[in-house]
């Protein structure tokens, strides 16, 4: 296996591919992310890792070392990987870039003892929709019976220490996974048996808890990046773009934006265009902060950052910035940039004349919830971001059809006066932060209502 992405191939510079970790709750997303960081830290005494705001940088050297440990003479050169710190498909859908997903590639974590669960399927649907290349981390292999304890090793090293019975049981479970993934439309295989990487999703058996399989995971991700992203990850210097992940208003410091810069270079003093609740606006980067580790742990002010990177941006204006908005450095025609900001802030939701009302915290999750409702044949009459307000309740209360007197609130609060208005006007609010549970509740409510009306 030979791989090569040179970071300076014929003068072409590359940025790190952005990686997101997805999967069902408790299958080990957070643990696997921590293990990836841990592996890196252990290998390079905190040198190979920079925890930016909201994202973690694993440098090229760490990945190359992982590859060399697995394959003698492997020539794997990648410009590092940037892992988004917030795992999950909701975060994945909320983080947009250029109408697509912010993450270039993904790790789908599946507990090998449980197999595909509802949020695994939701994750797969989202990966399909965005056409995001991914690998599967088949996690918790240490829980398979007859496991011989090892830790901090590659999967290949781990295998050498295991008994025949264990390996047979592991393979049996992997083939269950292969068959379940086939049901979702994907050909997959244990990664070390794959002959044609272009058609097969790699399954990397891991234990996040015992740090097993992390070199294998990093190597497969680097390979995936190389196969699919050559053109997408060329570093451009003519434009700078990012996505705002979180907006914070702090006394004294003004507004801070946690962002991921996915293209170009951002410098202090740059003029940036953003979407606000009052429409697109321009403001200036007053300062930038990144996290640092090691002896000088903490926030550090920087003058410039190069994609891909997580960075906290301080802006002076008290703009009401919408989380999830694109951020574009203003060079050239401002109106054109504003048009783009508006276009990129919109999502496609099939709205119908009749149906339920949906509120969600950001555009991406609004789209994700709407997609899942659509899959169940539930119509949507209105879909908006933000908390549930009294105005929303009054709006729904005026509808004639009792089946429409419901608001689905995903990851948002219901304001007290809205709560009261709902009680007074017989409007039901179905609230939650797990999509499939929310949809189940909506289905239950609609079925119950239908029965009452018959
Ligand atoms: P998440 O909800 O997907 O982020 O899952 P977490 O990372 O929080 O893990 C859920 C639980 O599974 C925690 O109790 C972890 O300690 C445990 N866990 C995660 N990975 C492993 C693993 O590889 N082996 C074992 N035995 N437990 C694990």
Image (spheres, grey):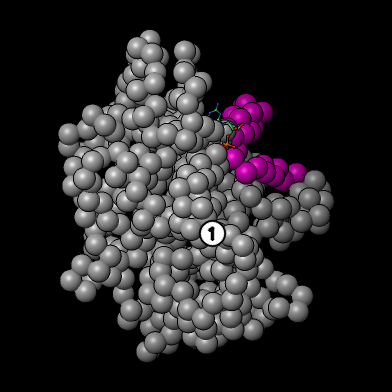
x then y, percent, for residue 145: 48, 13
Q: Quadrant of the C terminus?
A: top right
Q: Residue at x 18, y 47 (%)?
A: 2
**Picture quarter with ligand 1:** top right
- Residue, disc 1: 51
**Quadrant of the rendered image containing residue 179:** top left
Q: Quadrant of the N terminus?
A: top left
Viewer-closest of 290 and 90: 290
Viewer-closest of 401 and 183: 183
Magenta: main secondary structure:
helix
Asked whether the viewer can see residue 267, the reply is: yes
Residue 393 vertical placement versus 321 (above, below): above
Q: Is residue 343 magenta?
A: no
- Relative to 417, 235 lies left or right: left
Q: Quick one: which residue is furthest to the bottom in this view?
A: 332
Viewer-closest of 392 and 156: 156
x then y, percent, for residue 43: 45, 48
Q: Is residue 436 magenta?
A: yes
In the rendered picture of this protein, how many numbered marks are placed on residues? 1
Q: Residue at x 72, y 59 (%)?
A: 389
Q: Residues within 10 Å of mark 1 (few under 14, many from 20)?
A: many
- Relative to 238, 30 lies left or right: right
Viewer-closest of 372 and 123: 123
Q: Which residues are magenta?
A: 425-454
**Quadrant of the rendered image containing residue 190:** top left
Q: Residue at x 49, y 86 (%)?
A: 271
Q: Residue at x 53, y 63 (%)?
A: 52
- Relative to 166, 260 lies left or right: right
x then y, percent, for residue 79: 33, 60
Kindly state the secondary structure of the residue where label 1 is placed. strand
Asked whether the viewer can see residue 84, the reply is: no
x then y, percent, for residue 340: 40, 75
């Amino acid at each position: 296996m030979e791989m090569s992405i040179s970071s300076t191939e014929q003068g072409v510079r590359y940025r790190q591919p952005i990686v997101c970790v997805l999967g069902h709750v408790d299958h080990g997303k957070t643990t696997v992310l921590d293990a990836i960081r841990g592996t890196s830290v252990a290998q390079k005494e905190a040198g190979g890792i920079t925890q930016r705001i909201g994202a973690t940088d694993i440098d090229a050297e760490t990945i190359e070392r992982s590859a060399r440990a697995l394959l003698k003479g492997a020539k794997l050169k990648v410009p590092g990987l940037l892992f988004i710190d917030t795992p999950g498909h909701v975060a994945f859908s909320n983080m947009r870039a250029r109408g697509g997903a912010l993450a270039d590639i993904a790790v789908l974590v599946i507990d090998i003892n449980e197999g595909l669960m509802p949020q695994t399927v939701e994750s797969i649907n989202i990966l399909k929709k965005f056409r995001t290349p991914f690998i599967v981390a088949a996690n918790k292999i240490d829980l398979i019976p007859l496991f011989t304890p090892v830790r901090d090793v590659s999967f290949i090293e781990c295998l050498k220490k295991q008994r025949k019975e264990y390996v047979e049981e592991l393979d049996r479970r992997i083939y269950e996974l292969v068959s379940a993934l086939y049901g979702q439309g994907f050909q997959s295989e244990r990664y070390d048996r794959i002959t044609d990487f272009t058609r097969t999703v790699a399954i990397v058996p891991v234990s996040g808890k015992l740090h097993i399989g992390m070199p294998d995971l990093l190597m497969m991700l680097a390979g995936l990046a190389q196969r699919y992203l050559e053109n997408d990850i060329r570093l451009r210097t003519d434009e700078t773009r990012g996505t705002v992940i979180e907006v914070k208003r702090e006394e004294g410091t003004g507004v801070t934006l946690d962002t991921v810069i996915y293209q170009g270079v951002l410098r202090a003093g740059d003029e940036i265009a953003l979407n606000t609740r009052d429409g697109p606006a321009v403001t200036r980067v007053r300062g930038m902060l990144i996290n640092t580790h090691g002896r000088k742990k903490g926030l550090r002010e920087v003058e410039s950052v190069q994609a891909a990177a997580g960075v906290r941006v301080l802006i002076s204006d008290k703009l009401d910035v919408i989380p999830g908005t694109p951020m574009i450095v203003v060079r050239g025609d401002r109106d054109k940039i504003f048009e783009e900001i508006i276009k990129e802030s919109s999502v496609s939701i099939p709205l119908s004349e009749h149906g339920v009302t949906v509120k969600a915290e950001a555009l991406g999750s609004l789209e994700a919830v709407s997609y899942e409702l659509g899959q169940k044949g539930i119509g949507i009459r209105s879909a908006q971001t933000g908390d549930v307000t009294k105005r929303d309740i009054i709006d729904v209360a005026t509808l004639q059809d009792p089946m429409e007197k419901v608001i689905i609130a995903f990851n948002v609060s219901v304001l007290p006066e809205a709560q009261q208005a709902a009680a007074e006007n017989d409007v039901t609010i179905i609230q939650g932060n797990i999509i499939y549970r929310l949809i189940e509740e909506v289905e239950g409510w609609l079925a119950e209502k239908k029965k009452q009306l018959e």
